[in-house]
Amino acid sequence: MSSPVHEDDRLTAPRDFEPLQAASKRRMLIIVNPYATTVSDRLRHLVVYALQGRFEVDAVDTEARGHATELCREAAHEGYDVVVAFGGDGTVNEAANGLLGSSTPLTCLPGGSANVFGKMLGIPGDPVDATEHLLAMADDWRPRKVDLGVVNGHCFTFSSGLGLDASVVERVDSKPHMKARFGPYFFTWVAVTTFMRRYVVSPPRLVLEASGKTHDGVTAIVQNGSPFTYFQNRPIEIADGASLDSGALAGGVLHRASLGAMPFIAWRAFSRRARVANHRQITGLEQMTELTVRSADERSLPLQVDGDYIGEVAEARYSIMPRALHVVS
């Protein structure tokens, strides 16, 4: 019987790709979050080694929050042909903010628990398969532009939220070891317990204003793309009409968090046919270029951006930046 093959060992297997001539290799900067869920030193070295067959590769680890943004600004200034964000959605978000306004394209290697933006771009969720995908990309180089959402001056690639969603992210981010070990199951447990403890009786109230209309609620979701997130590889849909190149935002407002409604809303989020926006406690919103969400009861609202907890705010102003980010995948 043959011995099992470690997942990382697939990166060292013989390949069908023939190396390009050194002079024709594109310059690639890999920005690695060494604390991401699935990133290890061994995997990092194997990924870099594999990609060197097709690209002129430099790799650098992030050292603190915001470091990836600084590194991407420098990469754009130094003329790199592509930047790879190797980490979770937080690393991708920082990279996108750093490359904003430049012609240097962004791509991704999955290293976090969800890797939503990478999957939206068509990049596999498995790091080895994703590396193969990037190798093949060298022969099928098709940069394109996608939209970015903006909230209070901070860009986001796929989603932002206030209320229950952001409260869950805050609690999950406070326990990174549990997040790394149990992934979406830990998110689910935190969502249920947060809902029961903080949103059944007296949750913070908010008002969303868009297109001349106001909507009261306890949670607001704003999306720049679809889906909202993934449970493992299963897409979770919230808003209708969101895409990375639509030039507009989509979203939804949860008016009331009741024990009777939430199981049915959750079922709709997982369903391939039923729509969350069709639930009576949800108002779906499409084709928004600007909107504002503010506190309705003087309590600050928790805010998350691309799955990272940002803090509490009294008001969140949203807008869209069409075709603001170059990507390649």
Image (cartoon, rainbow, N blue to C red):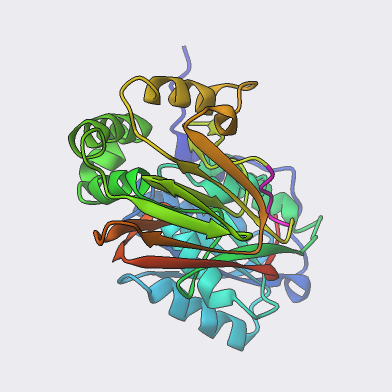
Vertical side of 249 occupied by 181: above or below: above
Seen at 61% across and 22% down, the residue is 274
Looking at the image, can residue 287 be seen?
yes
**Coordinates of residue 161 in the picture (x, y in percent):** 43, 52
The quarter of the displayed image where residue 4 is located = top left
Instruction: Pick the residue in front: 186 or 327.
Output: 186
First to last magenta residue range = 241-245
Q: Where is 60 relative to 90, above or below?
A: below
Q: Quadrant of the C terminus?
A: bottom right
| Location of residue 286 in the rendering, given as x and y in whole percent from the top left corner | 66, 49
- Where is residue 268 drawn, in percent x and y? 53, 24
- In the picture, measured across the screen, residue 151 lies left or right of residue 19, that is left
Q: Is residue 10 visible?
A: no
Residue 213 placed where, x, y %?
Answer: 58, 55
Q: In the figure, is residue 72 to the left or right of 27?
A: left
**Is 57 inside the magenta-drawn segment?**
no
Q: Horizontal placement of 172 versus 104: left or right?
A: left
Q: Main secondary structure of the magenta part?
A: loop
Q: Residue furthest front?
A: 213
Is 244 in the magenta?
A: yes
**Between 114 and 131, the one nearer to me in the picture:** 114
| Identity of the residue drawn at 79% across and 60% down | 141
**Residue lying at 52% horizontally and 73% vertically, measured from the top left:** 97
Q: Residue at x 55, y 68 (%)?
A: 96
For the image shown, how many numbered marks are present on the structure?
A: 0
- In the rendered image, the residue lying farthest to the bottom is 77
